[in-house]
Amino acid sequence: MAAVIDTMAGLPRSDIELYGDAALANPHPAYKALRDLGSAVYLDRYDACFIGRYADVAAALTDWETFSSASGIGLNPVINDAWREALICTDPPVHTERRALFSTALGPRALKSVTDTIERRADELAERLAARSSFDGVADLACDLPINVVMELIGWPIDVRPSLLAIAESAWNGAGPAGPRTDSGLQTLQAMMDLIADIYDNDRVTPDGYAAQLVEASRAGHITRETAIGLLAGYIVAAFETTIAAMASGAWLFATNPEEWDKLRADPRLAMSAANEIVRMESPLQKFARFVTRDARLSDGSVVPAGSWAIISYGSANRDERQFAEADRFRIDRRERQNLGFGQGPHNCAGQGLARMELSAVFTALAKRVSRFELVGEPERIVNNIAYGFARLPLRAVPG
Ligand code: HEM
């Protein structure tokens, strides 16, 4: 990545350690400091600009010609090369064609057919959890639907399913700036790409799943083997860790904000807006990078120069007090509904319908049986360059 420091002269600068342990475990003080400095802040340590105000993040995500994904979404050249065929690393028109392969599988019609399965599984889960004296909000609550329903829908071979979850979280570390955490993420990423290649070459995805549709498109000659493998990666890194993080975060938010749980119990129709509010507050994917192809003027008049890298932060935008009243407060009936936790523009999350359905089904089922959640131990955050969530969340669900 070439140094662009001279052309950044007009921007505020910061040496904040955004990818250090402390900021990854709790990024919000750093985000606020950076938002208050300006629409874009040049980060000395990473040779990239941070964009964290809602209005600027929304505009950058929409303006893909200026804030391009085609050079990659990571802060190092290794991941950007390894992922050049991934959906998130393409721009239109290539992106538009490939995205269609996901839209059918994850669109409203396909989702309708899985509603009953998801709701039934969520009911069984709620019944089990309410009967237990304590449980882990990650392994026992949040992983249930992604492992038992979504793995099946996608069609990953049964024997690799247990290892996919660990791979998914750790692989996101590979999108960070140079350093040991990123190096270890890149190693996992390589192992993941090798695993996908092996599954593809040996025709191991289960028939009728989402993954099979990508494999069929490739066997029919519509996309190459490399593209199919790149696109299949999206069904590992995007589909599990994100929803698991959101589900555990939701349980934690409800445990620490019992009045919001009472609201949901009183009016279960709030379940979908609760799902959105969880994603706003906790943003399971905190930030990606974009390559700036031409000078970009932001809302405060500052200019991010062509040729630089920009860190676009969903997590910061979602807590921007310029956009959200009491931005740090969890309110499931909040008036400002729109948030950027699922992205925006051409790359907006292809699986957001499925993710919202899972979240809403689980919390609706729990609301019927649980009067409140209690923390029965110290929650442990994951420390990851991109993902945000919990490693452990000791909980009790008080029946009622
Ligand atoms: C709460 C759960 C989830 C969150 C917070 C989330 C978040 C996001 C975000 C922020 C992006 C935008 C990336 C960008 O701007 O470059 C994205 C893209 C994507 N997501 Fe999700 N996601 C979730 C669940 C899922 C699920 C369940 C699936 C699939 C089953 C999925 C599949 C995808 C795919 C394929 C993309 C790439 C879209 C594109 O590049 O056009 N996601 N997601």
Image: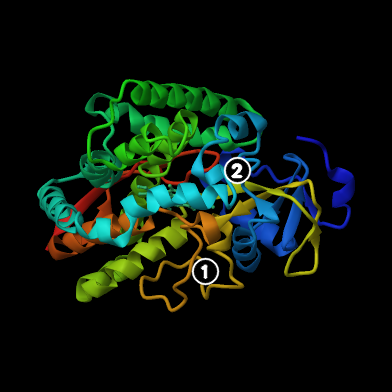
Horizontal side of 391 relative to 266 (left or right) equals: right
Which of the pair 11/117 is nearer the observer?
Answer: 117
| Of residues 232 and 132, the one drawn nearer to the viewer in this rendering | 232
Rendered image: mark on residue 226 = none
Determine whether the residue tagged by mark 2 lies in a helix, strand or loop: loop
Taking the spot 34% from the left edge, 46% from the top edge, the residue there is 244
How crowded is the residue under tag 2: few (<14 C-alpha within 10 Å), some, or many (20+)? many
Residue situated in front as seen by the camera: 233 or 289: 233
Q: Is mark 2 within 8 Å of ligand 1?
A: yes
Residue at the location (11% across, 50% down)? Answer: 124
Look at the numbered disc 1 and give the secondary structure of its residue: loop
Q: Amino acid at mark 1?
A: Ala
Which of the two discs, 2 and 1, labels the residue nearer the N terminus? Answer: 2
| As drawn, 103 above or below 233 | below
- The residue drawn where x is 25% and y is 39% is 147
Look at discs 2 and 1 and give the one toward the viewer: 2
Q: Which mark is residue 327?
A: 1
Residue for point 54% across, 61% down: 345
Instruction: Categorize mark 1 by other alpha carbons within 10 Å: few (<14), some (14-19), many (20+).
Output: some
Q: Position of residue 217 (x, y in %)?
A: 38, 39
Q: What is the count of numbered marks?
A: 2
Left or right of 294: which side holds 167? left
Residue at the far bottom in the pictured view: 335
Q: Quadrant of residue 379?
A: top left
Q: Work out which quarter of the rendered image holds the N terminus and state it.
A: top right
Name the mark on residue 73: 2
